[in-house]
Amino acid sequence: MIPVVKPYLPSREKLDKYLDGIYERAWLTNNGPLVQELTARLEEYLGVENLLLVANGTLALQVAYRALGVSGNENGEQQEAITTPFTFIATASSLKWDGVQPVFADIDPNTWCISPENIEQAITSNTKAIVPVHVFGNACDVEAIDEIARRHGLKVIYDASHAFAVQYKGESLLKHGDASTLSFHATKLFHTGEGGAIIFRRKEDLERAKKMINFGITGPESIGEVGINAKMNELQAAMGLCVLDEMAENLTARADVWQRYQEALGNAVQLQAKGHALSYNYAYFPIVFNSEKQAVHVAAALKENGVLARRYFYPSLNSVECFEAKADQSVSKDIASRILCLPIFSELTEINLAQITDIISDSLGGRSHD
Ligand SMILES: *Cc1c(COP(=O)(O)O)cnc(C)c1O
């Protein structure tokens, strides 16, 4: 089976050297030297400041909300955050887990990111924050969102899990909002096995979050506010340092796969419309068909031939009962019903991609008259 994603495995010899160092120092966690080194190298690579490594991308979101004062109740009122229904479940479940009600605003039918007009309409007196997602590495309308947030006094936390290394107008996309979060899960473009990071706009928020991820401990015998354990460990950092060293090769291989898909399928299916002045990271290759029937049919044809395409992100989160969505976000529901993500990872350059694109073209052709 060709999977939809495959963890990138860096040089084993290099990883072994880092492991030797960990054994010599016997320092496995609590802001060790490899975590410090990875922090500095990622800040440089991404072109950002105030980066905090954490244990995973979900905790990155939860710690970012808390550090920015977005949590549960305030004066007895249930707090709300406006987010997109077209995302991985963790974006919304992390809010709910922290006692904040996610309120969905529908997406743009072309970029598939949350639409600023719909955000504006969803704002109530209980809205505390906006949590947009740069879905599949495409940039949200960051200027419009930052402006709405300023006008209404809201915090903005971008779930940038898909936007590693994406540049917008010549700068890191991660510089927008009060914070941006990354996931370094094994299947993400850059990974540490499990892991994540928060990029804060302000240093004081970073300092608060640093204590929060270590139980709220402020000194050997003192505790500040309530915290959690969200620390990255040295083994995760060692993997990250090795993956980062090979990022250029990984990106080149993915770009090649991405372009070959685009050439073969670009005219037959809908692709995501990318914002202007945006560099892309080739992390995903999502395609949208004319109907749900067609998407399901193509997925089945691929599976019969040993290729797993996945329905990301299906179902649209406004259809998931536990979120108690009030309105029907019809654009998100519609795109979610017709989308498939095709396999994309660096080793795919070694197989004949035409095998995959021919199956898709054939099953589209065979169905064109129904
Ligand atoms: C992967 C992902 C997450 C969760 O990250 P983990 O590291 O798996 O906890 C959150 N949001 C989005 C959009 C993701 O794709």
Image (cartoon, grey):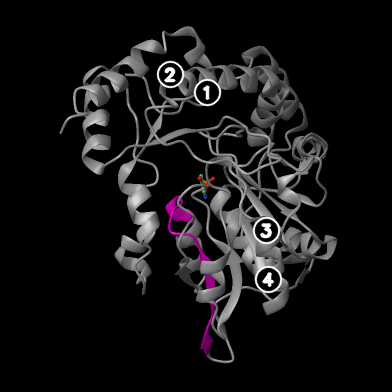
Q: Which residues are magenta?
A: 77-90
Q: Residue 264 bears which disc, if any?
A: 2
Between circles 2 and 3, the one closer to the viewer is: 2
Q: Earlier in the sequence, mark 2 or mark 1?
A: 1
Classify residue 338 by image quadrant: top left
Q: Residue 339 bears which disc, if any?
A: none
Q: CA distance from mark 4 to mark 2?
A: 41 Å
Tag 2 near tag 1, CB within 8 Å: no
Between circles 3 and 1, the one closer to the viewer is: 1
- Please state the total of marks drawn on the protein image: 4
Could you tell me residue 83's position as x and y percent? 51, 63
Q: Residue 149 bears which disc, if any?
A: 4
Vertical relation: 338 (above or below) 344 = below
Q: Residues within 10 Å of mark 3 (few under 14, many from 20)?
A: many
Identity of the residue drawn at 57% across and 86% down: 125
Q: Residues within 10 Å of mark 4 (few under 14, many from 20)?
A: some
Q: CA distance from mark 3 to mark 4?
A: 26 Å
* Residue 9 visible within the image: no
Q: Earlier in the sequence, mark 4 or mark 2?
A: 4
**Left or right of 357 in this view: 140:** right
Q: Amino acid at mark 1?
A: Trp
Q: Residue 258 bears which disc, if any?
A: 1
Vertical relation: 337 (above or below) 41 = below
Q: Amino acid at mark 4?
A: Ala
The residue tagged 3 is: 213
